[in-house]
Amino acid sequence: MWLINVETMQLEDFTVRPAPEYAILSHTWSEEEVSLQEFTCQNADTAKKEGFAKIVRTCSLAAENHIKYAWVDTCCIDKSSSADLTEAINSMFQWYKNAVVCYAYLSDLSPRQDAVTGDQKVDVSRQDYSLASRNELQGCKWFTRGWTLQELIAPKIVGFYDETWAFRGTKDDLAEPIESITHIDNAILRGYKKLADRAIAMRMAWASKRKTTRVEDVAYCLLGIFDVNMPLLYGEGNKAFTRLQEEIIKSNSDLSIFGWSPEERLISFSYPALSNVGCEVGCGHRDDNGDDFYSILATSPSEFLTPHSYNIVQSVEHSVTNRGIKIYCSLLEICLRGCNFVHCKCCGDNRKYVLVIGSVRLGFVGKYWGVVLDKISPDAFIRSGKHLIYIERDAFVAGQATPRAIYLLTQAPKSARHATLSLVIREGSDFIIQSTAPAEKWNSCKRYWYMEGGFAMWCMVSLKFGNVAGHGVSILVILHHVYVLDPRVYGAEIRLISQAGSNLDWGDIGEIFDFESLHRGGLKVMDRKLEVVAEFRSSLSEGYALEVWTEDIESDGRPARA
């Protein structure tokens, strides 16, 4: 750690020996800052720079407060050394915390005529200085920059100075307007509470509207806020924020890190739901060719806009794996149309899952909130939509499941960029989708399988007749051929395929079935006097589709109508 001796105006190295008491500067950078190399070899040009005047004024204030050393980020970090820069950024929160006092210079805060311009000592007992108002502070660039977040929170004492270096109050003096501007609560600003007492999502929200010059610094400036360390890789872009979240997950079981949303509201899910509640509310999937799913991790702090002053759920287990984020939790299973899964006719493509992140009491009503998920495979889930959802207590009780280990995917399947096979059930055919395989290639919202390798694939859907109990049918598609299977005859094979999923290829399917004995295209269901018909179709305009419908038949098997 390099410190400026305020008497000699020379840098001294305290990398090995303990650092003495020092003052520290917080400011926004201008075009004329002084580097370590320039400060070490000062000349007439250096002294003319705007940044040099800030260094001199900081040292002057420190001397007036009987502090022998000062630290200024522009000239006390050797930015030509990646090792020194990495150490400084990983240590910066602690350096600001350890400072005797922090001088926050607001270069765009206009002076008042009655502001003190003489004695600049930071003395909270004084009443002769002019406090800055909220209207004056909220227009200052200092409150919009990423790095100044930790520079506001970490120091015990922060003194604010306007563009003329007139003292305008301490952090304690201005706690109320600062809380209003930054949404950082008074207890954190005054040091009554620790940062660890605040949810991850709440701390992210503090940074949601702050900016940095380098995109990577959006993550690096938050290392101290979350008490994590990581190497700096300038050039990695938005991956830096992903790495930050992964480091946080490794040391914190707070589920609110998954509770991001770019919307400043929560969508309410009632139980039972209103009749007009549908897919657009429940998952937010787009109708164009954009991605259907989203990573469980946010792309930047700007996506943490929803208020998070709620009781947060803690996970028993958190870990980062090559499959995604592994957590041990209980998912809430819901039907977007509000049914209770008894004789449900809509759950095939409306059944979703909610990762419950927190709870809140609104009046006498207890509610839970979380994010909507789609099941990609038996133990893997992907985020569906960018909004957060409120769950009524009754819906939570009805749909809660036993806790288990699951994976939350951090990379969305690129289904929109591949060919798809749509499932089309003709109007009037009374079917409920019971299951699909491979489950990880099925999009339950849009009712299609995605085909990464062209049509060298297989898929299967099991359908149940909706109005009465019965065995239903299973439809197998392999290459371009369609087979309608009776579960009473092929139950073992159907279960094997469903369990194995994408571990099977079309050659394996050929070893399981004797295709010569299978029904191609249709299957007569005599006890219902109908035939289930399935057909593979393809067109340049609509792509691939599996169309299913029923036709009535007489008791002797002859068609009654088409």
Image: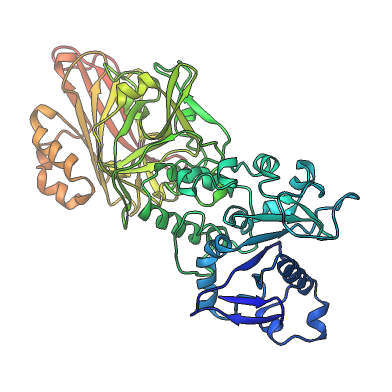
- Residue drawn at the location 40% of the way across and 21% of the way down: 337
**Image quarter of the C terminus:** top left
The correct choice, above or below, for 559 with respect to 296 in the image is above
Relative depth, front residue between 471 and 74:
74
Q: Is residue 96 left or right of residue 241?
A: right
Residue 215 in percent (x, y) is at 59, 61
- Residue drawn at the location 65% of the way across and 62% of the way down: 213
Q: Is residue 78 left or right of residue 517?
A: right
Relative depth, front residue between 276 and 491:
276
Residue 423 in percent (x, y) is at 34, 34
Q: Is residue 313 left or right of residue 109?
A: left
Relative depth, front residue between 499 and 493:
499
| Residue 475 in view of the camera | yes
The single residue placed furthest to the right in the displayed view is 113
The correct choice, above or below, for 118 with respect to 5 in the image is above
- Residue drawn at the location 17% of the way across and 18% of the way down: 470
Q: Is residue 86 left or right of residue 348?
A: right
The correct choice, above or below, for 376 with respect to 432 in the image is below
Relative depth, front residue between 332 and 475:
332
